[in-house]
Amino acid sequence: MLEIKSLSAGYNEHLVLKDISLSVYPGEVVALIGPNGTGKSTLMRAISGVLPSQYGNIELCGKNIKSLTSDVRARTLAVVPQVQSLPASFNVYQTVLLGRTPYLGWLGQAGKRDHDAVFQAMAQTKTEHLAERCIGELSGGEQQRVLLARALAQTTPILIMDEPTNHLDVSHQSSFLNLARQLAVQNGLAILVALHDLNLTSLYADRVAVLSDGYLKAIGTPEQVFIEENLSPVYGGQLRVVTHPEYGTPLVLPAGPDLEYAPRNRGYMIETSTESRAHAYA
């Protein structure tokens, strides 16, 4: 569905991505991970056609992205960006309807098919009750669901999401990724999502691609990729990988702290002696 072949891309003379090859298939969630500045957002821009590639090819449903008009590309691939500034005065329904723009004629009038797509997208994202609310009145989690609904209203077979959970609390992160996984399975979407949280990635991704210094360092299932030898060099520190006690997935932990300086009891008096108080506040 989404095929990236020997892609190199960047800005002016500076290559950010170097010889990237990656596939995403229908019904699959592939997570893109790596430290800040390694090229995750650059790859998303290249896939969406915003940033031209210098070398290599990107194919959407078997067609080279360079051969597609903007309308055809928008009917093939939808993007959920990082939390962005949405028009505060638009209501939710109007915002989701923007996803139908590639299908509207010269007059820009939405028809029954467009409204049906909006209703379905809002039902899938559980945003129907927000339809008349202004965007400026919504929480960050609600706005992110609206962005997902807008992308779903495009009714594309490919969905890419650039760190969509960055500004959400833990509960909303889990809820959002659970919904994305449901959509991949139920709608047969090919989903590529850039994420920071390794343990959420382990829970929700079918496969994981690791970017570091512009190169694809590893790709495979979480069990194949999330091993200490792969992650520690990429993230610049010693990491431990254990098995999650409930889900059986890899669980990534930082190496144990230096207990002599660990701030676990900082500011709390467990013992009452003068020496103990001095040590606790040191």
Image (cartoon, grey):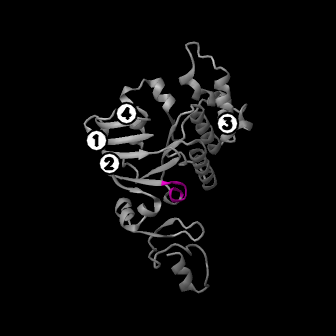
Task: Identify the residue under disc 4.
Answer: 51
Q: Is residue 173 left or right of residue 201?
A: right
Instruction: Tell me the residue at 62%/85% (across/down).
Output: 272
**In magenta stretch: residue 205:** yes
Between the residue at mark 2 and the residue at mark 4, the CA separation in whole angstroms equals 15 Å
Of callouts 2 and 3, which one flags the residue occurring earlier in the amino acid sequence?
A: 3
Secondary structure category for the residue under label 2: loop
Instruction: Tell me the magenta residue range.
Output: 200-206
Q: Which residue is mark 3?
A: 122
Q: Name the front one of labels 4 and 3.
A: 3
Q: Which residue is mark 1?
A: 15
As helix, strand or loop, the secondary structure at mark 1 comes to: strand
Point out which mark residue 214 bears: 2
The tag earlier along the polypeptide, 2 or 4, is 4
Asked if residue 51 is positioned above or below residue 168 in the image, the reply reads above
Look at the magenta stretch and give its main secondary structure.
helix
Residue 217 in percent (x, y) is at 34, 55
Q: Amino acid at mark 4?
A: Leu
Q: Secondary structure at mark 4?
A: loop
For the residue marked with disc 1, what is the amino acid?
Answer: Leu
Sequence order check, earlier mark of 1 and 3? 1
Marks 1 and 2 in Cβ contact (< 8 Å): yes
Residues at marks 4 and 3 touching, judged by CB atoms closer than 8 Å: no
Give, as a three-letter code, the residue at label 2.
Gly
Q: Earlier in the sequence, mark 4 or mark 3?
A: 4
